[in-house]
Amino acid sequence: MATTGPDLGILGIASGLDTQSLIDKIMAFESRPLSLLQGQIAQLKSQQNAWNPLRGLFQSLQDAVLALTEDAGWQPQAASVSDATVLAAAATPDAVPGVYTVQADQAYLAQTGRTDPMARAEIDTSTVTTISDPNAPLGYTGSFSLNGGPAVTLDGTEGLAEIAAKIDDVSAATGVRASVVAVYDQASNQTHEALVLQSLKTGEANGIRYADATTSAGGASLFVGLGILASPTDDRAQAQAVVQAAQDAHFVVNGIPMVSDSNVVSGAIPGVTLTFKNLTATSQVTVSLATDVDQVVKNVKAFVDAFSKLVTTFSQDTSYDPATKTAGPLLGNLDVLLAKSRLGADVQSVVVGAGTYQTLAQVGITQQRDGTLAFDEAAFRAAFESDPASVAALFRGEGGVAQAILAETHRWLDAGGILDSADDSWDARIQDLTEQADRLNDFLAQREALLKTQFQALETAISRMQNQAATLSSLFAQLAANQRAISANG
């Protein structure tokens, strides 16, 4: 209720009454409906505040259960390698359990004379030995491009370092990086600056391609002058300029020869990505694939934890403490009570078609007196190792636990479901009561102003009457004095 400060004109100076106190008591009595409205609004907001976290808890439960309805939840594959310094392996749920041998392709090595089958990126370097200052202008004009990318234009003022910088500026489009390095020449016992170009992609198909339309006072083009190309019409570096040739990875998996333009290989083993680190002619690595039981346990435990957290919140929000007479904000909420009951029935249900294991209790998941779940990991591991298909069917099979729980989460989470409907209802009720409270507050403010006006008028009337009485008293006193004077003179 809006109130104003004390008005000096109605403090009871004339009447002797504590008029402000009288007004406060009247307004306190007439404000009781407003207090009731404010209490109802506070109670609804408390309930809504307790309701809002349920969305996140139901979502966590739904996510955990969904993971147990998918192949990845029950068939995660773990890949292990016999020598992690040679290669790494990462498996997806599509991987087929088994043992695979990966080694260098000896036939390829014999044909090429190379010492390892790893994929390589091409590295070309200039071979001239006369450039001692990387910033000295080289005098080349015109343009060139690499790998069909944007043209790099020269005006004759660029030195080796600036040319390298211009190549780097377009490296995102060309896939070629440039640098300038100091190279020691044993024949001349001198150090000179060299331009080094490196492909950012591995494999023979990703060797650097040149298109050189530059020229100089001497007539040579840039890459011919640097000794990288033998002729300006060539599109590949001459052999003497190739420090490392582009090379595919050649390897054998379980006796089957394979090739890749990258050291990261997918498909050589179904569902597995291999990353070659140091595969040499003498390397032979075993890749073993098996179901990752630890991940399955983690998935099931996530479900147990999400379920228990939701049920614990239900219990707290619907509790009542008789000692303190304190009720939870959702005490008596029918939706919460029904959800708790249905979820409890879901985790205790019998899944007839699951096979060996037909209840959660048989695989180490038991419901406690407070409604939460306890997880016996050792019992679950034993059941899963004994009959993994039955354990999975208990959750994800027809009529399984996951289906029943998902049905409940959808009732709450789907658009227009329990959570949305309740939120809309609370918002509408709070808004309606707030509008009622605002109107009543305005009325009370007007009522208080009216009372102050009325008491002010009363004080004014009393003051006027007091002034009149004082005037009459003075006149009577003067009349009596006059009469006494007349009597004394007579």
Image (tube, rainbow, N blue to C red):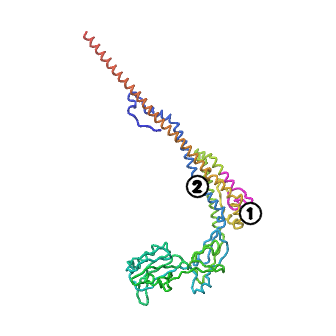
Residue shown at 39% from the left, 25% from the top = 462
* Residue toward you, 323 or 22: 22
- Amino acid at dot 2: Gly
Residue 299 drawn at (x, y percent):
63, 63
* Residue toward you, 69 or 80: 69
Left or right, residue 325 beside residue 481: right
Q: Which residues are magenta?
A: 340-366
Does residue 346 belong to the magenta stretch?
yes
Above or below: residue 478 compared with residue 152: above
Left or right, residue 351 beside residue 107: right
Residue 202 drawn at (x, y percent):
54, 77
Residue 356 - label: 1
Residue 14 drawn at (x, y percent):
38, 27
**1 and 2 marks in contact (CB < 8 Å):** no
Location of mark 2 (residue): 56
Left or right, residue 301 beside residue 451: right
Badge 1, how many Cα within 10 Å: few under 14, some, many 20+?
Answer: some
Above or below: residue 303 compared with residue 481: below
Residue 430 drawn at (x, y percent):
55, 44
Q: Tag 2 or tag 1, which sits nearer the N-term?
A: 2
* Residue toward you, 273 or 472: 273
Residue shown at 54% from the left, 39% from the top = 36
